[in-house]
Image (cartoon, grey):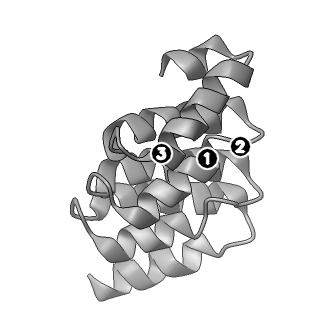
């Protein structure tokens, strides 16, 4: 198992976006729910240059992180303002699963998304 994790760590830093995306998806699929290390590794990729990686990160956080996990919630809030509509959509879905209604930063980010986003699919998420 340690060897597989080491390979995922290397793959998350690979110069090829497709490799980083596959690594993020594999990490989310293989990690236990609530795995803090996996959440941290995914959250570090929230500003990846590749939009597919950022989308996979949002999807992965929704799967792995516990509700109200501060690291995951902070990453999801950043994802809500992403330039890519698919990342914003994945972030909105993750926010629904991870953010508490009392989280004012998350609620503010969602309100901003809904009021400014021309992509109705992101708002419907």
Q: Closer to the camera, 83 or 3?
A: 83
Indicate which disc, 1 or 3, sits on the residue closer to the N terminus.
1
Q: Which residue is mark 1?
A: 79
Choose top left, top right, bottom left or bottom right for residue 102: top left
- In the rendered image, which quarter is residue 17 located in? bottom right
Crowd rating for badge 2 (residues with CA inside 10 Å; few <14, some 14–19, many 20+): many
Quarter containing the N terminus = bottom left
- In the picture of the structure, the residue carrying the numbered disc 3 is 104
Answer yes or no: do the residues labelled 1 and 3 have beta carbons within 8 Å? Answer: no
Q: Quadrant of residue 19?
A: bottom right
| Mark 2, secondary structure of its residue | loop
Label number found at residue 82: 2
Q: Residue at x 73, y 63 (%)?
A: 16
Rendering coords of residue 72 (x, y %): 43, 59
Name the side, left or right, on which 82 lies relative to 66.
right
| Residue at the spot 53% in from the left edge and 48% down from the top edge | 105
Q: Is residue 90 visible?
A: no
Density class for disc 1 (Cα within 10 Å; few <14, some 14-19, many ≥20) is: many
Question: Residue at position x 74%, y 15% from top?
Answer: 118
């Amino acid at each position: 198992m340690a060897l597989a994790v080491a390979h995922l760590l290397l793959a998350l830093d690979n110069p090829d976006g497709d490799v980083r995306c596959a690594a993020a998806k594999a990490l989310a699929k293989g990690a236990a729910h609530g795995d803090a290390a996996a959440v941290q590794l995914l959250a570090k990729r929230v500003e990846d240059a590749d939009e597919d990686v950022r989308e996979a990160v949002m999807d992965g956080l929704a799967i792995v992180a516990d509700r109200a996990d501060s690291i995951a919630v902070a990453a999801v809030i950043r994802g809500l303002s992403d330039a890519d509509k698919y990342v914003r959509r994945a972030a909105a879905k993750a926010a629904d699963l991870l953010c508490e209604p009392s989280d004012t930063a998350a609620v503010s980010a969602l309100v901003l998304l809904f009021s400014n986003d021309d992509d109705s699919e992101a708002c419907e998420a």
